[in-house]
Amino acid sequence: MLNLKGILFKLRRAFGLSRHSSIAKRGHFVVYTADGKRFVVPLGYLESTIFRELFRLSELAFGYPNSGPIKLVCDAVFMEYAFSLVRKNISINVE
């Protein structure tokens, strides 16, 4: 029999989603998508073109966050796609 809670936990970990901790692990930071989903992003992802562009677009749309969370202009589906591109080391041309 499949353990649904276990599967959901593994999927959340795989995509950087978390419901339990408000503080990111060491070497990670938290962002929210336009639809309110929370993602824990490894600092190394800041080197990717796609994440730098997401931050640039978000700065244009929302400005710099003063005291609130970092909010990106994309939705959760696109964010999961961006994660998969970076994980697979897809070339800059595809990004």
Image (tube, rainbow, N blue to C red):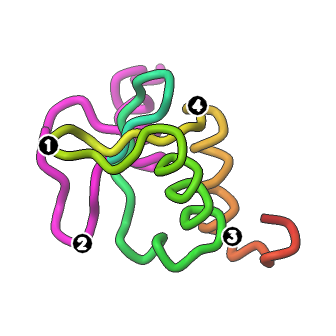
Q: Secondary structure at mark 2?
A: loop
Q: Secondary structure at mark 1?
A: loop
- Mark 3 Cα shell of 10 Å, populated few (<14), some (14-19), many (≥20): few
Write down the residue under mark 2. 27
**Residue 4 sits inside the magenta stretch:** yes
* Earlier sequence position, callout 1 versus callout 2: 2
* Earlier sequence position, callout 2 versus callout 4: 2
In the depicted structure, whether residue 28 falls above or below residue 18 = below
Q: CA distance from mark 1 to mark 3?
A: 33 Å
- The front one of 59 and 40 is 59
Give the percent coordinates (x, y) of residue 78.
Answer: 66, 39
Write down the residue under mark 3. 88
On the image, which quarter does residue 73 sit in? top right
Write down the residue under mark 1. 67
- The front one of 95 and 63 is 63
The range drawn in magenta is: 1-30
